[in-house]
Image: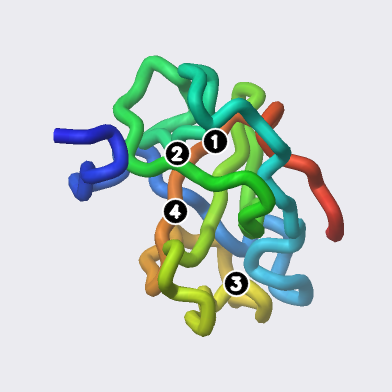
Amino acid sequence: MAKDDYSGPIPLPIKIGGDGPELDACGTYAQVVDFDASGEDVPYVHDAPSAATKARDKLTSGQGVKVCETQNDFSGIVYAGERETDVDCKTDSPVATEQNYTGPCRSGWVDNRFLQMTAG
């Protein structure tokens, strides 16, 4: 099974709404920085904030993500898949209480060095 084919549960769910009920569920927008796509050091999306955990997806250079939380030099992100450009990930509006992200978009943890925060 390829690293980007994993569809099992996320051991550490992404929390949304951590900035309070008046702010967006995920208040920071970031883009994936340029990287050597042919190398081994690529922006994998992990199941938890550690490179030692299973990788479930791989981001592409320039891809936009919403950052919902940070932990251990990793960001908990929400993002649309490659062919899901018109999907509303439901992170641009407030939520009443902090809660686990349950969709409709993809989510996971990525090493912060692969992200350039652009807003939020």
Mark 2 element type: strand
Q: Nearer the viewer, residue 81 or 89?
A: 81
Ranked by sequence position, the earlier of labels 2 and 3 is 2
Mark 3 element type: loop
- Amino acid type of the residue that numbered disc 3 sits on in the rendered structure: Thr
What is the distance, in whole Å, between disc 2 and disc 3 at their CAs? 18 Å
The reply to whether discs 1 and 4 touch (Cβ–Cβ < 8 Å) is no
Which mark's residue is nearer the viewer, 4 or 2?
2
In this picture, is 36 found above or below 12?
above
**Label 2 packing within 10 angstroms: few (<14), some (14-19), many (20+):** many
x and y, in percent, of residue 61 in the image: 63, 45
Ranked by sequence position, the earlier of labels 3 and 4 is 3
* Residue at 37% from the left image edge and 65% from the top image edge: 102
Q: Which residue is mark 3?
A: 91
* Residue at 35% from the left image edge and 23% from the top image edge: 53
Q: Which residue is mark 2?
A: 45
Which mark is drawn over residue 3?
A: none
Residue with the most extreme right position: 119
In this picture, is 45 found above or below 18?
above
Quadrant in the picture for the C terminus? bottom right
Which mark's residue is nearer the viewer, 1 or 3?
1
x and y, in percent, of residue 31 in the image: 71, 51
Q: Which residue is mark 1?
A: 110
Which mark is drawn over residue 107?
A: 4
Mark 1 element type: strand
- Amino acid type of the residue that numbered disc 1 sits on in the rendered structure: Val
What is the distance, in whole Å, between disc 1 and disc 3 at their CAs? 18 Å
**Label 3 packing within 10 angstroms: few (<14), some (14-19), many (20+):** many
- Amino acid type of the residue that numbered disc 2 sits on in the rendered structure: Val
What is the distance, in whole Å, between disc 1 and disc 2 at their CAs? 5 Å
x and y, in percent, of residue 91 in the image: 60, 72
